[in-house]
Amino acid sequence: MNTKEHYDHHLGDFYDWMVGDFTTKQQEQYDFFVAHHIVPQSNGVAIDLGAGHGLQSIPLASLGFQVQAVDFNEQLLAQLKVKSGGYDIQMIQEDLMLFAQHMPAAELIVCMGDTIAHLDAFEDLQAMITHCYRALVPGGKLVFSYRDYSAVLTGTQRFIPVKADENRILTCILDYAEDKVMVTDQLYEKTEKGWVQKISAYQKIRVTPEIVHRYLKQTGLKEVTSENSNRMIYTIAEK
């Protein structure tokens, strides 16, 4: 199953539940943007690649950006529409790589929540960074957040408890190859007939800070900061 199919037929059904309290999570993103002085300064256009249900799009809009929220999953964009209220957010259902080739001029492009690992190959990541560089206005910023897959998890380390309540139990199982990680989302869901197991798997590319730094440098983007927060790497680069 490819990434889009995984989201369309499995993860999209419970993504909002998995992420947790939306208000708290979006406030964390808002605080991150403010702390790093990410506010409109030129044309005001921000592109959110892999926007999901709006954890970054809504804080950016609340800061005054004109946001283009791009995602391939209809369910998540529908949730974003409900959550967005009256903010200036244009929702675009499209594959990231197809949209990236035609991005309008923007002063900010974000691709967060481990979205870059969902690309099919490292060549796609390199190409996307190149497309971002071309779309950014001078002084524009590119923001990534992603998991560092440098260290291989083995044995029982591969089983990661994600979330559980009285009705659902979600476990993520990782299997490492040389440049890929097979991700299996195992969900137990309580129904009238008892507990039901639902499983789906897809591949991610094994993104590391070294790879991201190299591609940014090759493209001509200057890495401003890279920090680790809550097991995620946050990288900001500038044109």
Image (spheres, helix red, strand yellow):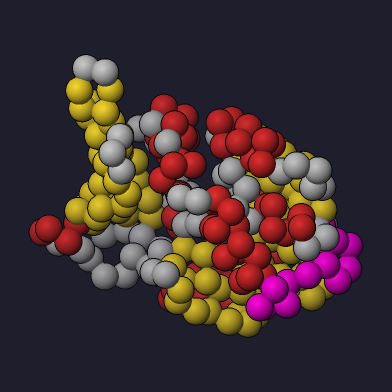
Residue at figure coordinates x 28%, y 31% from the top left: 189
Q: Which residue lies most toward the front here?
A: 166
Residue at figure coordinates x 20%, y 23% from the top left: 194
Q: Which residue lies most toward the right here?
A: 43
Horizontal and vertical percent position of residue 142: 66, 67
Horizontal and vertical percent position of residue 57: 68, 52
Q: Could you tell me what secondary structure mostly forms the magenta stretch?
A: loop
User: Is residue 33 rendered to the left or right of residue 155?
Assistant: right
Horizontal and vertical percent position of residue 218: 59, 74
Residue at figure coordinates x 59%, y 30% from the top left: 74
Name the residue nearer the viewer: 12 or 83.
Answer: 83
Q: Is residue 38 magenta?
A: yes
Asked whether residue 116 is in view, the answer is no
**Which quarter shows the N terminus?**
top left
Horizontal and vertical percent position of residue 128: 60, 56
Query: Is residue 175 positioned above or below 229 on the image?
Result: above
Name the residue nearer the viewer: 139 or 62.
Answer: 62
Q: Which residue lies most toward the left here?
A: 155
Q: Which residues are magenta?
A: 34-46
Number of labelled discs?
0
Query: Is residue 37 positioned above or below 7 on the image?
Result: below
Asked whether residue 119 is in view, the answer is yes
Q: Which image quadrant is residue 24 in?
A: bottom right
User: Is residue 225 rendered to the left or right of residue 3?
Assistant: right
**Which quarter shows the C terminus?**
bottom right
User: Is residue 155 rendered to the left or right of residue 144?
Assistant: left
Residue at figure coordinates x 41%, y 64% from the top left: 147
Q: Is residue 77 magenta?
A: no
